[in-house]
Image (cartoon, rainbow, N blue to C red):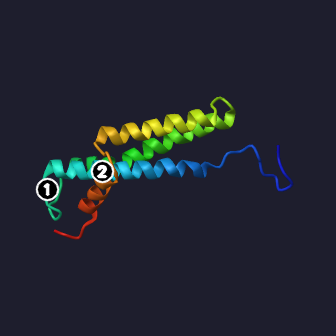
């Protein structure tokens, strides 16, 4: 069904996926901080290409994966194959599982990881 401007009123705005991209980015920050702590490298130390690529995958991978999952589920809601309740329940469960797997139990863990990654200390 379209309105006078040719817009589809049944179309669901894809901007809702941004919620899951942001949660994925937060998980990526936590994962990258844990990876850097595991490596025990200094900020000015050069990393081999393989470790640098793995660090980039740790930083951006969770956001991409959660964004792709959310996009697919939003399409399923749009097609009428999945109700909104299932969409929110499943994606919230996936996000909670990701944070639990990473050992992020509260906002203080996220703030500590961000401070570790983005502080100006050498």
Residue 100 rendering spot, x and y as whole percentages? 33, 39
Q: Earlier in the sequence, mark 2 or mark 1?
A: 2
Residue 59 rendering spot, x and y as whole percentages? 33, 51
Instruction: Check disc 1 and report the residue beneath it.
Output: 41
For the N terminus, which image quadrant? top right
Instruction: Check disc 2 and report the residue beneath it.
Output: 30
In front of the other: 54 or 81: 81
Q: Residues within 10 Å of mark 2 (few under 14, many from 20)?
A: many
Q: Residue furthest bottom?
A: 120
Q: Residues within 10 Å of mark 1 (few under 14, many from 20)?
A: few
Residue 3 rendering spot, x and y as whole percentages? 84, 51
Residue 93 rendering spot, x and y as whole percentages? 45, 36
Residue in view at x 31 percent, y 46 percent: 104
Is label 2 or label 1 in front?
2
In front of the other: 107 or 9: 107
Residue 56 seen in render: no
In this picture, residue 87 sits left or right of residue 43: right
User: Compared with residue 121, is residue 48 higher up or lower down, i.e. above or below?
Assistant: above
In this picture, residue 84 sits left or right of residue 41: right
Mark drawn on residue 56: none
In this picture, residue 3 sits left or right of residue 110: right
For the C terminus, which image quadrant? bottom left
């Amino acid at each position: 069904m379209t309105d006078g401007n040719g817009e589809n009123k049944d179309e669901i705005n894809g901007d809702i996926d941004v919620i899951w991209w942001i949660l994925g980015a937060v998980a990526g920050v936590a994962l990258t901080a844990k990876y850097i702590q595991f490596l025990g490298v200094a900020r000015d130390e050069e990393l081999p290409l393989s470790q640098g690529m793995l660090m980039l995958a740790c930083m951006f991978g969770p956001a991409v994966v959660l964004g792709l999952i959310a996009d697919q589920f939003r399409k399923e809601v749009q097609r009428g194959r999945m109700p909104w309740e299932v969409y929110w329940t499943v994606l919230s469960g996936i996000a909670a599982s990701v944070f639990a797997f990473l050992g992020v139990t509260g906002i203080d863990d996220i703030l500590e990881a961000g401070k570790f990654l983005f502080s100006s200390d050498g």
